[in-house]
Amino acid sequence: MGNTLITISRQHGSGGTKVAQILAEKLGIWYYNREILYIAADKIGYDSLDEKSMDEINYKKASQYMEGLSIMTGSRNHIPVYNQMFKEQSKIIKKLAGYGSGVFLGRCADYVLKDEPGVCSVYLYAEESYRIKHLSEKEGRAVTAEEIRKEDKMRSSYYSYYTGRNWYDMENYDLAINLATIEAEEAAQLILDYMEKRK
């Protein structure tokens, strides 16, 4: 029958992580998120970095800081670290998809797996006011609109840089769901219903 592959792209603070976890649990398949980043970092010799530094390397692109860092690594092929991270993550995503079914959160997985048969790509979003409230409750502090916009801008820029596509363009996805209007459990079921009908 082939693998069940679901990719989830989501706005910061929308609650997409929970939906992805519920989906994986309902289907009894693997859920992949930051593990892919850690494996990629290990592959290129950056496993000792803390989480914040790893995120910086993952998201930053052609900045002076990253160019300097790539020079300092003395990489034989002189591929900048940020490009190495994306290349390694893409290889890992493809390899994991080849091993079996899974739910992939972020990492441009919708683009990386776009040629895989039957892959379902989902975009999860919500109004800014909802996301501020949701994230503030989750983190136990007052999250600002500026923080959310900054993270979304970073995700959008990263996606555009590596895929050549617009992160906000709904034509990139099979399904888009507003999580401000539906519970995570219901959103997960909606995705499953869509996949069943699509068959």
Image (cartoon, rainbow, N blue to C red):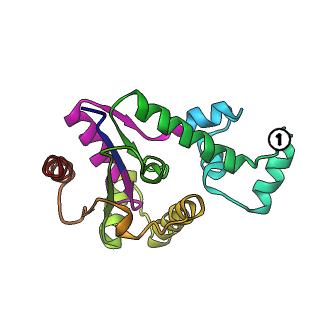
Q: Is residue 15 magenta?
A: yes
Residue drawn at point x = 33 percent, y = 46 percent: 119
- The image shows residue 29 at horizontal and vertical percentages of 29, 31
Q: Residue at x 22, y 34 (%)?
A: 27
What is the crowding at mark 1: few (fewer than 14 residues within 10 Å), some, or many (at least 20)? few
Q: Which residues are magenta?
A: 8-36
Q: How many numbered discs? A: 1
Q: Is residue 3 left or right of residue 57?
A: left
Along the horizontal axis of the image, is 42 left or right of 166? right
Q: Nearer the viewer, residue 32 or 2?
A: 2
Image-quadrant location for residue 60: bottom right
Depicted 90 relative to depicted 29: above or below:
below
| Residue 2, above or below 57 | above
- Please name the amino acid that badge 1 sits on: Thr
Residue 98 in the image: state x and y as whole percent: 42, 31
Residue that label 1 marks = 73
Q: Residue at x 48, y 65 (%)?
A: 152
In the image, is residue 33 above or below residue 156?
A: above
Residue 73 at what x, y percent from top left? Answer: 82, 41
Q: Quadrant of the N terminus?
A: top left
Q: Is residue 2 magenta?
A: no
